[in-house]
Amino acid sequence: MSDSSKYERRGVSATKSEVHAAIKGLDKGLYPKAFCKILPDFSAGDPEYCNLMHADTAGTKPSLAYMYWKETGDLSVWEGIAQDALVMNLDDMACVGCVDDIIISSTIGRNKGLVSGDVIKTIIQYTQRFAQEMEELGVKLHLAGGETADVGDIVRTVDVGYTAFGRMRRDDLLVNHIQPGDVIVGYASYGQATYETSYNGGMGSNGLTSARHDVFDHGYAGQYPESFDPSLPEDVVYIGGKKLTETIDVDGEAIPIGKLVLSPTRTYLPLIKQLFTHLKADMHGMIHCTGGGQTKVVKFIDNVKVIKDNFLPIPPLFNLIQSVSGTGWKEMYQVFNMGHRLEVYLPEDKAAEAIALGEQFGIAAQVVGRVEASDAPEVEIRTPHGTFNYNE
């Protein structure tokens, strides 16, 4: 079965082509190449300021957290789900320079018959703790409450989302203007940053439908039928054979595979704030490699070719997903971050400083590629497994 066939039969897409078709022609805001949509300052009407509002969820990752929680009773995985949904908003906004005084509101929908109040309590309390931890690192988040609803008729387990709002000066914005001669500094999505309490496998909140069905054992389909769409063909549901509590050795530590896949999406907020403090004038672009994986940047370039040919080592998690699923390497780089989820585009003589800022937080970083002139936007990924080209 081809990779594209599996994705389509599971109701997902590596390229989100239908979504992009639906929004084609919509207003792209004040700066179309900015990583987030930038709006006029509707809140105060000041032409020197702008507004940003961003909404996102943890995707289908809560479905895997639900199974792991049911298997083990470990409520801590729900803290990771709260972080996943928060970071998918915050780090996207940070890529344009919005790194402080951000207002957050949550929307949580659950099937009350299956998801207990302890889960909701864990998610809400961790949101508060995450905000406190970020403030200690110099980033102020303001919690505005939200909506928690029992909607079992439409949510099979639980859905966790946040909306974030920021206001900032327009001259503080970073609008992508990636250009020939730039190098790309990539920051690891895996390992353990100084502000993390355990090893992070590197997973974000993208590609989870593929990862959980390709990695885990088919027996979970009968055990937890509420964890997937009942209309899916049986031959694409949990076809990998791995148990949630089966362990994998990572740097001498035995980590359950379920928990490794559930690694919370790392936030780069503290690092990004430092990048804007020290290198704002030198940065030509910043990309959060979420939906689209290593091809994400193609949406934000004009007439340049982005070449990535010096990747950080692929972390154990993504090697595991590829080996168990047999997914082609071209699709792997388009679906997953493959080891780095933040990229900065800047002149070569500034790369060492950008790398050092990452290392201050225990985040591995290196020059992963460069930018060349081209007749059309293109991403070329050169790996030991082949060279792959993407133009959308």
Image (spheres, helix red, strand yellow):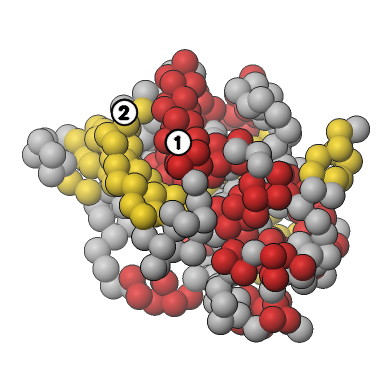
Q: Amino acid at mark 1?
A: Lys
Q: Residues within 10 Å of mark 2 (few under 14, many from 20)?
A: some
The residue wearing badge 1 is 121
The residue wearing badge 2 is 142
Which mark is nearer the camera, 1 or 2? 1
Q: Residue furthest front?
A: 113
Q: Position of residue 271 (x, y in %)?
A: 54, 27
Q: Marks 1/2: CA distance?
A: 19 Å
Determine the image quadrant of residue 80.
top right
Q: Position of residue 108 (x, y in %)?
A: 39, 49
Q: Position of residue 64 (x, y in %)?
A: 63, 55
Q: Residue at x 45, y 42 (%)?
A: 117
Q: Position of residue 239 (x, y in %)?
A: 77, 71
Disc 2 secondary structure class: strand
The N terminus, quarter of image: bottom right
Q: Residue furthest top?
A: 136
Q: Nearer the viewer, residue 292 or 9?
A: 9
Q: Is residue 383 something that shows in the picture?
A: no
Q: Residue at x 27, y 68 (%)?
A: 26
Disc 1 secondary structure class: helix
Q: Residue at x 42, y 45 (%)?
A: 89
Q: Amino acid at mark 2?
A: His
Q: Is residue 96 something that shows in the picture?
A: yes
Q: Nearer the viewer, residue 147 or 36?
A: 147
Q: Is residue 38 left or right of residue 188?
A: left
